[in-house]
Image (tube, grey):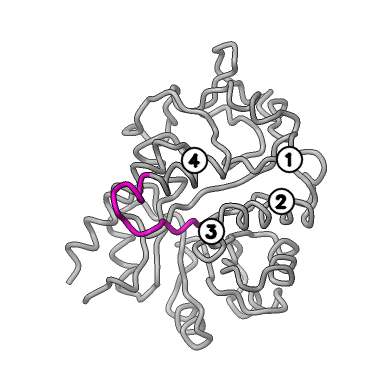
Amino acid sequence: MNIRPDFQVHGHRGCRGLYPENTLPAFEMASRLGVDAIELDIVISKDSRVVVSHEPYFSHLYSTSPEGKAIKKYIEKKHNLYELTVDEIQTYDVGLRRHKDFPSQKEIACYKPTLQEAVRHIDAIRKKQKQAPMHYSIEIKRKKRWDDKFHPSAKPFVDLVLSELRSLKISKRSSLLCFDLEVLEYIHRMAPDIQLVYLVDNLYSIERNMNRLTFTPDVYGPKFSLVDKKSIQYCNTLGIDIVCWTVNRESDMKKLIRMGIKGITTDFPDILMNVIGKIK
């Protein structure tokens, strides 16, 4: 079974199992491991910059304050990125405290980069090494109940992101991912040329999920445990790729590949690359 070149490896938050998530070292290692796309998350700062972060605040799981103190869970949301400038955000550390769920993760001083900084860093490395430009799989982290508290509302949020993609000239090699239907619909209207990924973690049927949108997305992105033969057949009929998340066990990787999905997002691209090399 030859699964390349159609099958895609997406490095989740870079390579969270190996390096601190959503940081330059994680993205650099993911690139070195040979991923087809770097998956990352974005939020907005006080000064309207697009910042790479899974939460719109500093997580207690791995963040350290500018004073060198571990962020506690009960106050983590007070360290709100939407109330901090980029300069202020980058005085925090997000790498010296290893994430408890990833014992092999390197402990290394890191900060949250802007999207601009991350893209330029990886693109420069790949150009120097004469490699093809990287594809960026960018998740917009929007929750309606957090509008104007932890991030802008859908339209201004998306407008900032689209402006950044155009400025960086990466629209044609980027995918925008979101669970939020309002965000997906707005992007489809404003930038129909950009690949859209419909993220799903609910128990609805694939037909019901698709009927929630007014258009057909380029990619269906379910939690990997929700993937079954029916959803794969449905997507194949409509010409939709399935790239599922977040798959970290070798046995699950093998099962999903043999089922015929188009891509896997993983915290351990090294394991997935090894699995791909062994599957016949």
Circle nearer the N terminus (1, 3) = 1
Q: Where is residue 136 in the image (x, y as percent from the top left)?
A: 49, 56
Residue occupying the point 69% across, 71% down? 188
**Magenta stretch bounds:** 125-137
Label 4 sits on residue: 22
Residue occupying the point 22% across, 55% down? 274
* Amino acid type, mark 4: Asn
* Amino acid type, mark 1: Ser
Q: Where is residue 97 in the image (x, y as percent from the top left)?
A: 45, 23
Q: Is residue 119 magenta?
A: no
In this view, the mark in front (3 or 2): 3
Q: Is residue 134 magenta?
A: yes
Q: Position of residue 139 (x, y in %)?
A: 58, 54
Do callouts 2 and 1 mark residues in contact (Cβ within 8 Å)?
yes
Label 3 sits on residue: 170
Whether residue 109 sits left or right of residue 196 in the image: it is left
